[in-house]
Amino acid sequence: MEHTGRFLRSDFAGPRRVLRIGAYSTGYLYFAYQLSPWIGLGVGVVLAMLLAVAIGIPTFRLRGHYFAIATLLIGEGVQIFFQRWELVGAASGIFLPIVREQAWLNFQFHGTKLPYYYIILAFLALATFVVWRLDRSRIGFYFRAIRDEPEAASSLGVNVTLYKSFAFMISAGLMSMAGAFYCQYVLVIDPETVFPLSMSILVVLMAVMGGAGTLWGPIIGRRRAGAALRADADLLRWHRRQPGSDDLRGTHRAHLHFQTRRPGRAP
Protein backbone atom coordinates (compact mmCIF):
# COMPACT_ATOMS: atom_id res chain seq x y z
CA MET A 1 0.00 0.00 0.00
CA GLU A 2 3.03 2.21 -0.28
CA HIS A 3 2.19 2.94 -3.92
CA THR A 4 1.43 6.60 -3.23
CA GLY A 5 5.11 7.05 -2.47
CA ARG A 6 5.56 7.01 -6.25
CA PHE A 7 4.40 10.60 -6.37
CA LEU A 8 5.55 11.95 -3.02
CA ARG A 9 8.69 11.86 -0.95
CA SER A 10 8.96 9.06 1.57
CA ASP A 11 8.62 11.50 4.48
CA PHE A 12 5.20 12.47 3.12
CA ALA A 13 3.88 8.91 2.92
CA GLY A 14 1.96 9.67 6.09
CA PRO A 15 1.56 8.50 9.67
CA ARG A 16 0.80 4.90 8.75
CA ARG A 17 -0.07 3.84 12.26
CA VAL A 18 -2.70 6.56 12.48
CA LEU A 19 -4.26 5.51 9.19
CA ARG A 20 -4.82 1.91 10.33
CA ILE A 21 -8.14 3.10 11.67
CA GLY A 22 -9.70 0.57 9.30
CA ALA A 23 -8.73 -2.29 11.62
CA TYR A 24 -10.49 -0.77 14.61
CA SER A 25 -13.56 0.41 12.71
CA THR A 26 -14.10 -3.01 11.14
CA GLY A 27 -13.46 -4.90 14.36
CA TYR A 28 -15.50 -2.66 16.63
CA LEU A 29 -18.56 -2.47 14.37
CA TYR A 30 -18.56 -6.24 14.00
CA PHE A 31 -17.98 -6.85 17.71
CA ALA A 32 -20.46 -4.32 19.08
CA TYR A 33 -23.17 -4.15 16.39
CA GLN A 34 -22.65 -7.34 14.34
CA LEU A 35 -22.28 -5.27 11.18
CA SER A 36 -20.70 -7.02 8.23
CA PRO A 37 -16.92 -6.46 8.06
CA TRP A 38 -17.39 -5.25 4.50
CA ILE A 39 -19.50 -2.37 5.83
CA GLY A 40 -16.89 -1.72 8.49
CA LEU A 41 -14.22 -1.66 5.79
CA GLY A 42 -16.09 1.09 3.94
CA VAL A 43 -16.63 3.06 7.13
CA GLY A 44 -12.95 2.70 7.97
CA VAL A 45 -11.88 4.02 4.58
CA VAL A 46 -14.06 7.12 4.99
CA LEU A 47 -12.86 7.73 8.56
CA ALA A 48 -9.23 7.27 7.57
CA MET A 49 -9.56 9.79 4.74
CA LEU A 50 -11.17 12.35 7.03
CA LEU A 51 -8.52 11.78 9.67
CA ALA A 52 -5.80 12.14 7.05
CA VAL A 53 -7.08 15.59 6.13
CA ALA A 54 -7.42 16.59 9.79
CA ILE A 55 -3.82 15.54 10.45
CA GLY A 56 -2.33 16.63 7.15
CA ILE A 57 -3.50 20.23 6.83
CA PRO A 58 -1.89 21.45 10.11
CA THR A 59 1.38 19.65 9.32
CA PHE A 60 1.71 20.51 5.61
CA ARG A 61 3.71 23.61 6.50
CA LEU A 62 6.46 21.36 7.82
CA ARG A 63 8.90 19.72 5.43
CA GLY A 64 11.54 17.04 5.36
CA HIS A 65 12.53 15.57 8.69
CA TYR A 66 10.30 17.95 10.61
CA PHE A 67 7.22 16.57 8.88
CA ALA A 68 8.34 13.00 9.56
CA ILE A 69 8.91 13.77 13.25
CA ALA A 70 5.52 15.48 13.56
CA THR A 71 3.61 12.59 12.02
CA LEU A 72 5.60 10.11 14.11
CA LEU A 73 4.60 11.94 17.29
CA ILE A 74 0.97 12.02 16.18
CA GLY A 75 1.11 8.27 15.62
CA GLU A 76 2.51 7.73 19.10
CA GLY A 77 -0.22 9.93 20.55
CA VAL A 78 -2.96 7.98 18.79
CA GLN A 79 -1.51 4.70 20.03
CA ILE A 80 -1.51 5.97 23.63
CA PHE A 81 -5.08 7.20 23.18
CA PHE A 82 -6.27 3.78 22.00
CA GLN A 83 -4.43 2.10 24.88
CA ARG A 84 -6.63 4.06 27.29
CA TRP A 85 -9.92 4.10 25.36
CA GLU A 86 -12.19 1.68 27.20
CA LEU A 87 -14.82 1.67 24.45
CA VAL A 88 -12.49 -0.30 22.16
CA GLY A 89 -11.00 -2.47 24.88
CA ALA A 90 -8.11 -0.15 25.82
CA ALA A 91 -4.79 -2.02 25.98
CA SER A 92 -6.51 -5.44 25.94
CA GLY A 93 -8.07 -4.77 22.55
CA ILE A 94 -11.01 -6.54 20.91
CA PHE A 95 -11.44 -10.28 20.39
CA LEU A 96 -13.75 -10.90 17.47
CA PRO A 97 -16.25 -13.77 17.75
CA ILE A 98 -15.57 -16.78 15.54
CA VAL A 99 -18.39 -17.36 13.06
CA ARG A 100 -18.42 -20.33 10.71
CA GLU A 101 -21.64 -19.57 8.79
CA GLN A 102 -21.76 -17.31 5.73
CA ALA A 103 -17.99 -17.10 5.42
CA TRP A 104 -17.89 -14.45 2.70
CA LEU A 105 -20.42 -12.21 4.40
CA ASN A 106 -18.62 -12.42 7.74
CA PHE A 107 -15.14 -12.26 6.17
CA GLN A 108 -14.00 -15.36 8.09
CA PHE A 109 -12.61 -18.49 6.46
CA HIS A 110 -11.70 -21.32 8.82
CA GLY A 111 -11.62 -24.32 6.50
CA THR A 112 -8.96 -22.87 4.21
CA LYS A 113 -6.96 -19.64 4.07
CA LEU A 114 -7.08 -19.48 0.27
CA PRO A 115 -9.93 -16.91 0.14
CA TYR A 116 -7.77 -14.50 2.15
CA TYR A 117 -5.13 -14.76 -0.55
CA TYR A 118 -7.56 -13.83 -3.30
CA ILE A 119 -9.02 -10.95 -1.28
CA ILE A 120 -5.65 -9.34 -0.53
CA LEU A 121 -4.64 -9.96 -4.14
CA ALA A 122 -7.75 -8.03 -5.23
CA PHE A 123 -6.82 -5.21 -2.83
CA LEU A 124 -3.34 -5.11 -4.31
CA ALA A 125 -4.72 -5.03 -7.85
CA LEU A 126 -7.05 -2.18 -6.91
CA ALA A 127 -4.22 -0.16 -5.34
CA THR A 128 -1.98 -0.75 -8.35
CA PHE A 129 -4.75 0.25 -10.77
CA VAL A 130 -5.50 3.46 -8.83
CA VAL A 131 -1.85 4.52 -8.89
CA TRP A 132 -1.47 3.52 -12.55
CA ARG A 133 -4.44 5.69 -13.50
CA LEU A 134 -3.19 8.59 -11.39
CA ASP A 135 0.21 8.34 -13.02
CA ARG A 136 -1.37 8.98 -16.42
CA SER A 137 -3.68 11.79 -15.32
CA ARG A 138 -3.29 15.51 -14.75
CA ILE A 139 -3.44 14.92 -11.01
CA GLY A 140 -0.43 12.63 -11.25
CA PHE A 141 1.45 15.33 -13.11
CA TYR A 142 0.63 17.75 -10.28
CA PHE A 143 1.80 15.20 -7.72
CA ARG A 144 5.18 14.84 -9.41
CA ALA A 145 5.54 18.60 -9.71
CA ILE A 146 4.85 19.03 -5.99
CA ARG A 147 7.30 16.23 -5.16
CA ASP A 148 10.14 17.72 -7.20
CA GLU A 149 9.60 21.49 -6.93
CA PRO A 150 6.71 22.55 -4.67
CA GLU A 151 7.58 26.25 -4.89
CA ALA A 152 7.67 26.17 -8.68
CA ALA A 153 4.40 24.22 -8.80
CA SER A 154 2.75 26.75 -6.50
CA SER A 155 4.00 29.65 -8.62
CA LEU A 156 2.34 28.07 -11.67
CA GLY A 157 -1.04 27.96 -9.96
CA VAL A 158 -1.04 24.44 -8.50
CA ASN A 159 -2.88 24.29 -5.19
CA VAL A 160 -0.20 22.45 -3.23
CA THR A 161 -2.26 21.99 -0.06
CA LEU A 162 -5.24 20.62 -1.97
CA TYR A 163 -3.27 18.02 -3.89
CA LYS A 164 -1.21 17.03 -0.89
CA SER A 165 -4.47 16.43 0.97
CA PHE A 166 -5.74 14.35 -1.94
CA ALA A 167 -2.60 12.20 -1.96
CA PHE A 168 -2.80 11.86 1.81
CA MET A 169 -6.41 10.66 1.53
CA ILE A 170 -5.50 8.05 -1.09
CA SER A 171 -2.74 6.68 1.11
CA ALA A 172 -5.08 6.66 4.12
CA GLY A 173 -7.82 4.81 2.26
CA LEU A 174 -5.50 2.10 0.98
CA MET A 175 -3.87 1.61 4.37
CA SER A 176 -7.32 1.41 5.97
CA MET A 177 -8.27 -1.43 3.63
CA ALA A 178 -5.12 -3.28 4.64
CA GLY A 179 -5.95 -2.70 8.32
CA ALA A 180 -9.46 -4.10 7.87
CA PHE A 181 -8.04 -7.20 6.17
CA TYR A 182 -5.54 -7.69 9.01
CA CYS A 183 -8.33 -7.42 11.58
CA GLN A 184 -10.40 -10.14 9.91
CA TYR A 185 -7.38 -12.37 9.36
CA VAL A 186 -6.15 -12.49 12.97
CA LEU A 187 -9.54 -11.75 14.64
CA VAL A 188 -7.75 -9.88 17.43
CA ILE A 189 -6.85 -6.20 17.45
CA ASP A 190 -5.04 -4.20 20.11
CA PRO A 191 -2.82 -1.09 20.05
CA GLU A 192 0.42 -3.06 20.22
CA THR A 193 -0.30 -5.09 17.08
CA VAL A 194 -2.20 -2.49 15.06
CA PHE A 195 0.06 0.51 15.68
CA PRO A 196 3.61 -0.91 15.87
CA LEU A 197 6.51 1.30 14.84
CA SER A 198 8.19 -1.70 13.24
CA MET A 199 5.33 -2.08 10.78
CA SER A 200 5.63 1.56 9.73
CA ILE A 201 9.36 1.09 9.16
CA LEU A 202 8.72 -2.08 7.16
CA VAL A 203 6.25 -0.29 4.88
CA VAL A 204 8.83 2.39 4.09
CA LEU A 205 11.55 -0.24 3.71
CA MET A 206 9.55 -2.05 1.04
CA ALA A 207 9.36 1.06 -1.13
CA VAL A 208 13.04 1.92 -0.61
CA MET A 209 14.32 -1.60 -1.34
CA GLY A 210 12.09 -2.02 -4.38
CA GLY A 211 12.66 1.41 -5.84
CA ALA A 212 10.93 4.54 -4.59
CA GLY A 213 9.07 6.42 -7.29
CA THR A 214 8.21 3.32 -9.36
CA LEU A 215 4.91 1.52 -9.81
CA TRP A 216 6.25 -1.98 -9.14
CA GLY A 217 8.85 -0.94 -6.56
CA PRO A 218 6.78 -1.68 -3.43
CA ILE A 219 5.81 -5.11 -4.76
CA ILE A 220 9.41 -6.05 -5.52
CA GLY A 221 10.56 -4.47 -2.27
CA ARG A 222 8.11 -6.61 -0.32
CA ARG A 223 9.87 -9.76 -1.54
CA ARG A 224 13.31 -8.32 -0.84
CA ALA A 225 12.36 -7.11 2.63
CA GLY A 226 10.75 -10.46 3.44
CA ALA A 227 13.84 -12.33 2.28
CA ALA A 228 16.09 -10.06 4.37
CA LEU A 229 13.96 -10.57 7.50
CA ARG A 230 13.91 -14.35 7.04
CA ALA A 231 17.69 -14.43 6.54
CA ASP A 232 18.17 -12.37 9.70
CA ALA A 233 15.92 -14.72 11.69
CA ASP A 234 17.76 -17.78 10.35
CA LEU A 235 21.11 -16.23 11.28
CA LEU A 236 19.90 -15.52 14.80
CA ARG A 237 18.64 -19.08 15.25
CA TRP A 238 21.94 -20.46 13.93
CA HIS A 239 23.90 -18.33 16.37
CA ARG A 240 21.81 -19.50 19.31
CA ARG A 241 22.55 -23.13 18.42
CA GLN A 242 26.31 -22.59 18.46
CA PRO A 243 28.31 -23.86 21.46
CA GLY A 244 29.17 -21.09 23.87
CA SER A 245 26.39 -18.76 22.82
CA ASP A 246 24.91 -18.91 26.34
CA ASP A 247 28.35 -18.19 27.79
CA LEU A 248 28.65 -15.12 25.60
CA ARG A 249 25.28 -13.83 26.79
CA GLY A 250 26.25 -14.57 30.40
CA THR A 251 29.54 -12.71 29.95
CA HIS A 252 27.67 -9.75 28.49
CA ARG A 253 25.24 -9.69 31.43
CA ALA A 254 28.13 -9.86 33.90
CA HIS A 255 29.84 -6.97 32.12
CA LEU A 256 26.69 -4.85 32.35
CA HIS A 257 26.34 -5.71 36.04
CA PHE A 258 29.94 -4.67 36.67
CA GLN A 259 29.41 -1.39 34.83
CA THR A 260 26.37 -0.54 36.96
CA ARG A 261 28.11 -1.48 40.24
CA ARG A 262 31.36 0.41 39.73
CA PRO A 263 32.36 2.86 42.51
CA GLY A 264 30.84 6.23 41.89
CA ARG A 265 27.78 4.81 40.13
CA ALA A 266 24.37 4.50 41.68
CA PRO A 267 23.24 0.87 42.11
Image (cartoon, helix red, strand yellow):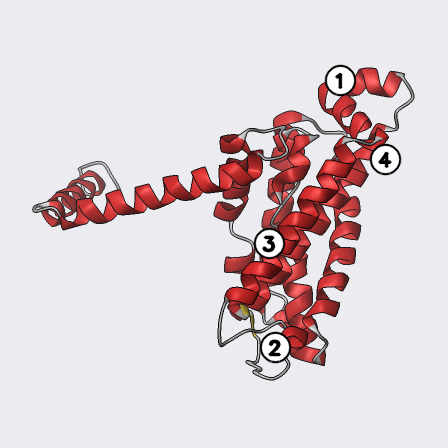
Q: Which amino acid does label 2 sit on?
A: Ala
The quarter holding residue 71 reads: top right
Compare residues 173 and 189 and report the one nearer the observer: 173
Q: Nearer the viewer, mark 1 or mark 3?
A: 3
Q: Tell me residue 12's x, y (percent).
A: 67, 33
Earlier residue among tags 1 and 3: 3
Distance from disc 2 to disc 4, alpha carbons, whole Å, reads: 41 Å
Marks 1 and 3, Cα distance to the nearest angstrom?
A: 35 Å
In front: 132, or 176?
132
List x then y, in percent, for residue 149.
Answer: 75, 17
Residue type indicated by callout 1: Glu
Mark 2 touches mark 3? (CB < 8 Å): no
Report the disc number at residue 130: none
| Residue 149, label in figure | 1
Q: In the rendered image of this protein, does residue 164 appear above or below residue 190?
A: above
Q: Distance between the residues labelled 2 and 3?
A: 18 Å
The kind of residue on which mark 3 rests is: Leu
Residue at the disc numbered 2: 103
Residue corresponding to mark 3: 121
Whether 232 is drawn above or below 151: the answer is below
Label whose residue precedes the other's in the sequence (1 or 2): 2
Give the mark nearer the N terminus: 2 vs 3: 2
Q: For marks 4 and 3, give the CA distance.
A: 31 Å
Q: Quadrant of the N terminus?
A: top right
Can I make out residue 18 in this image? no
Marks 1/4: CA–CA distance: 16 Å
**Residue at left 61%, top 28%?**
65
Q: What residue type is labelled 4?
A: Leu
Nearer to us of marks 4 and 3 is 3
What number is the disc on residue 162?
4
Q: Earlier in the sequence, mark 2 or mark 4?
A: 2
